Image (spheres, rainbow, N blue to C red):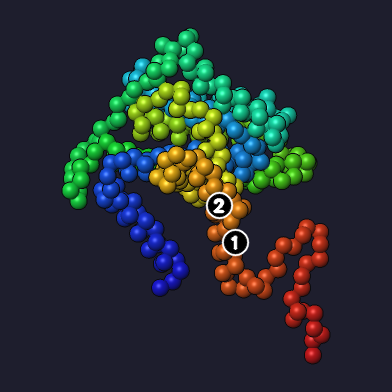
């Protein structure tokens, strides 16, 4: 069996597993899987900004909140179908992110992180403001109704209900967003973002418009997070200002670091971590779950400083045929290793 056949067989097994798993578990577990997919999209959006472009943000919980409230308001106040709220929420967050990123161009590193931190603190308070209370519901938030599936049936003794339908809907949107990110980051735009991250002066010399690229990257990152927020609002069927505190922004950044910077598949690992590890910590210790969570996070960062996908890439490179013979860590401008056979005089 060839390697290509093994790859196709693996994809086929994955598709079958994703199709069957929701009917093998309870509704609450299906709901948790929905949130993993939602967080994966949000972490991917933050990774585009931080991992690929080098801009640190502690305010992506604000974009998540804007996307969630955008979907909730459009569904509750204007009667739009749930699927139509996703592109509109993404567009609103793109404009919001572009406007936020443009004045922050002069800030880098921890200065930009502090500026976006102010955004994460301000947005939940603005959602409670009386001038917007008619649309946002104030401190009470907005209660939604989960969409019914287009048809019903039973499989393995379980009904095809709203949670299972939302899982497949969220999965389809997740695949679409990840394909868009893959095509975006594996082309000229992705190379430009990495050049800006690693060598901004050299990138500007090569003709890359740094202010425009940074602002658009901020907007695209916010759009991804806004779509995730809209999906999260539909899955939870409730939004309130207290659901989008600074903790959410920190959790998204933790997901990026745990999964691995500049890693597209790492978003799923980070999403699973921030969804399940707090629950595991709570089961281990009811009195101090945050302490257990912190210890697990420290151990993970100590053992895998480049994230889970960074360790996977390192092990994959080590196991490749001929990895021991290939030159490693060749510095730019330094001497290029020459195979011993080429240094011998021909006989």
Q: Nearer the viewer, residue 266 or 181?
A: 266
Q: Residue at x 52, y 38 (%)?
A: 251
Residue 134 in sight in this render: yes
Residue denoted by label 2? 300
Give me the C-alpha separation between circle 2 and circle 1. Answer: 16 Å
Q: Which mark is residue 302?
A: none
User: Does label 2 or label 1 sit earlier along the sequence?
Assistant: 2
Q: Nearer the viewer, residue 191 or 165?
A: 165
Q: Nearer the viewer, residue 255 or 146?
A: 255
For numbered disc 1, what is the local secondary structure? Answer: helix
Which quadrant would the C terminus be assigned to in this image?
Answer: bottom right
Left or right of 144 on screen, residue 57: right
| Residue 152 percent across, percent down from the top left | 19, 39
Residue denoted by label 1? 314
> On screen, 191 above or below 346?
above
Quadrant hosting residue 229:
top left
Q: Residue at x 58, y 46 (%)?
A: 257
Q: Residue at x 79, y 86 (%)?
A: 346
Q: Residue at x 65, y 72 (%)?
A: 324
Furthest residue toward top? 131
Q: Residues within 10 Å of mark 1 (few under 14, many from 20)?
A: few
For numbered disc 2, what is the local secondary structure? Answer: helix
Left or right of 310 on screen, residue 132: left
Mark 2–mark 1 contact, CB under 8 Å?
no
Q: Residues within 10 Å of mark 2 (few under 14, many from 20)?
A: some
| Residue 144 percent across, percent down from the top left | 33, 24
Furthest residue toward front? 287
Residue 89 in sight in this render: no
């Amino acid at each position: 069996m060839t390697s290509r056949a093994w790859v196709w067989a693996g994809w086929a097994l994955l598709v079958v597993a994703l199709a069957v798993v929701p009917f093998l578990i309870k509704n609450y577990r299906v709901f948790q899987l929905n949130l993993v997919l939602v967080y994966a999209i949000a972490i991917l959006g933050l990774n585009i900004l931080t991992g690929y472009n080098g801009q640190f943000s502690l305010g992506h919980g604000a974009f998540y909140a804007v996307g969630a409230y955008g979907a909730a308001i459009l569904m509750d106040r204007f009667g739009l179908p749930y699927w139509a709220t996703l592109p509109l929420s993404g567009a609103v967050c793109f404009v919001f992110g572009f406007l936020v990123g443009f004045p922050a161009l002069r800030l880098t590193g921890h200065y930009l992180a502090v500026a976006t931190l102010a955004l994460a603190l301000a947005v939940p308070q603005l959602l409670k403001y009386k001038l917007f209370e008619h649309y946002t519901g104030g401190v009470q938030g907005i209660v939604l109704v989960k969409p019914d599936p287009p048809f019903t049936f039973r499989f393995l003794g379980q009904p095809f209900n709203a949670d299972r339908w939302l899982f497949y809907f969220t999965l389809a949107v997740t695949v679409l967003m990840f394909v868009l990110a893959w095509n975006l980051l594996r082309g000229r735009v992705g190379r430009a973002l990495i050049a800006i991250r690693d060598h901004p002066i050299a990138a500007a010399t090569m003709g890359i418009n740094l202010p425009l690229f940074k602002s658009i990257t901020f907007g695209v990152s916010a759009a991804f997070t806004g779509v995730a927020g809209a999906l999260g609002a539909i899955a939870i069927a409730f939004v309130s200002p207290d659901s989008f505190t600074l903790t959410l922004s920190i959790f998204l950044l933790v997901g990026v670091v745990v999964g691995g910077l500049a890693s597209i598949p790492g978003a799923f690992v980070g999403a699973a971590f921030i969804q399940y590890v707090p629950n595991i910590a709570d089961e281990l210790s009811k009195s101090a779950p945050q302490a257990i969570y912190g210890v697990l996070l420290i151990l993970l960062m100590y053992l895998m400083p480049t994230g889970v996908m960074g360790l996977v890439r390192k092990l994959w490179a080590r196991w490749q045929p001929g990895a021991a013979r290939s030159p490693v860590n060749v510095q730019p401008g330094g001497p290029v290793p020459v195979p011993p056979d080429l240094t011998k005089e021909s006989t």
